[in-house]
Image (cartoon, rainbow, N blue to C red):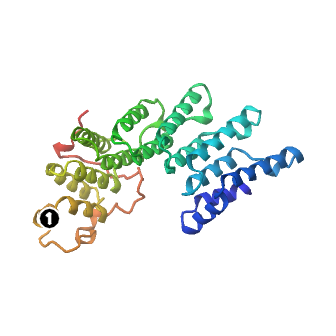
Amino acid sequence: SFTIVIQAWSSLQDETGVFHSKLLFVEWADAMDIFDRMWDRYESGGDQSCKPDSAAFSAVISCIAATPDGPGGSGALHVLQRMKQLAKEGHTNVAPNARTYTSVIKALRTSRDDHAMERAMELLEEMEEAFQAGNSALEPSRIHYNVVLSLIATSRLEDKTEPAIKLFREMKTRNRKSCQPDSVTYNTLLGLCATNVHGSTEVKDATMAFALEIFREILHHKTVRPNALTFCNFLKSLRRLTPDNVDAVEPTVSLCCQLGLLTNRFLKELSYMIEDRDRLAYLLRLDVMPDFLTVLDFPPEWSQHNARKRHDVRNPKKVIVTSPYFRNSN
């Protein structure tokens, strides 16, 4: 029951949910005291209903990750270390599993720890080593890689693409289906590129080259399909990294409309990039340019798939790429 309550709290996203998370875990010592009392009650009285397991610990870590003012990454790492220690002492039911590591990495992502990225990479490597040694419960999947990539994207690094490219390449070389990139991976990388704008000209050029590589790869992928977020993030990368690269805009808009993935967010990004209203009207095949662009100004088939789940990889419409700009370089 205790585990279920914590899981419910950790999954709440509204103001009430955040309040309850803060209420329970506002003091890290209080949270651990609850577990100490549960453990003592189990060991001293043999009360099986109070026996914490890996699910209970993972739920606590998830709650930490969901609490903005909680103990953050350090608290999550503390719980993980305690789980490892208890497992060594013979309490195998609390041994960390893949879900535990997901929760810890998420907690690191939301923390203010300057070394969060390095610690997340170490945890990922730790999982890989344990899995290769025969611990199937710690098999890293695309979920773990995606969360680490998301952490890199929100970091303060001047050049985020260097560690992201390295991790992405490593992900693809893993000979496991569960580790292969999905639409979340591609969208996260494109979003990362769109925020990697504070480096030198060389860094920006390399970032845009990587964004184009990623975009081309998902367009030609056999199973993963681009979605509305894919096009928004790529267009944002174009706007922020190479604002004068108008040659890429027209095929991007055309392909987005062809796939029925036009959104108001995409139109907003496009209006930021193309300030000339006449050119924008020509690009969108409009006779009269409205004051405020929305998808309702265009044929319904241009936006027929934009209501799909943001990270859905099952979009059945095959991508037919005709523009030489997006020709697969492989």
**Image quadrant for the N terminus?**
bottom right
For label 1, the crowd category at 10 Å Cα-Cα, with few meaning under 14, some 14 to 19 and many 20 or more, is: few
Side of 119 relative to 262 (left or right): right
What is the quadrant of residue 170 in the picture?
top left
Q: Horizontal and vertical percent for residue 108?
A: 52, 46
Residue at horizontal 20%, vertical 48%? 242
**Image quadrant for the C terminus?**
top left
Side of 196 relative to 245 (left or right): right
Residue at horizontal 30%, vertical 65%? 264
Q: Horizontal and vertical percent for residue 79?
A: 65, 44
Q: Horizontal and vertical percent for residue 313?
A: 41, 49
In the rendered image, which residue does mark 1 sit on? 285
What is the quadrant of residue 180 in the picture?
top left
Note whether 271 is above or below 90 in the view shown.
Answer: below
Q: Horizontal and vertical percent for residue 157?
A: 37, 42
Residue at horizontal 42%, vertical 53%? 312
Residues 227 and 248: in front is 248
**Dot 1 amino acid type:** Arg
Q: How many labels does the image show?
A: 1
Note whether 292 is above or below 178 in the view shown.
Answer: below
Q: As drawn, which residue projects farthest toward the top?
A: 133
Secondary structure state at the residue bearing disc 1: loop
Note whether 294 is above or below 1 in the view shown.
Answer: below
Side of 91 relative to 316 (left or right): right
Note whether 76 is above or below 136 in the view shown.
Answer: below
Residue at horizontal 67%, vertical 47%? 57
Residues 227 and 127: in front is 127
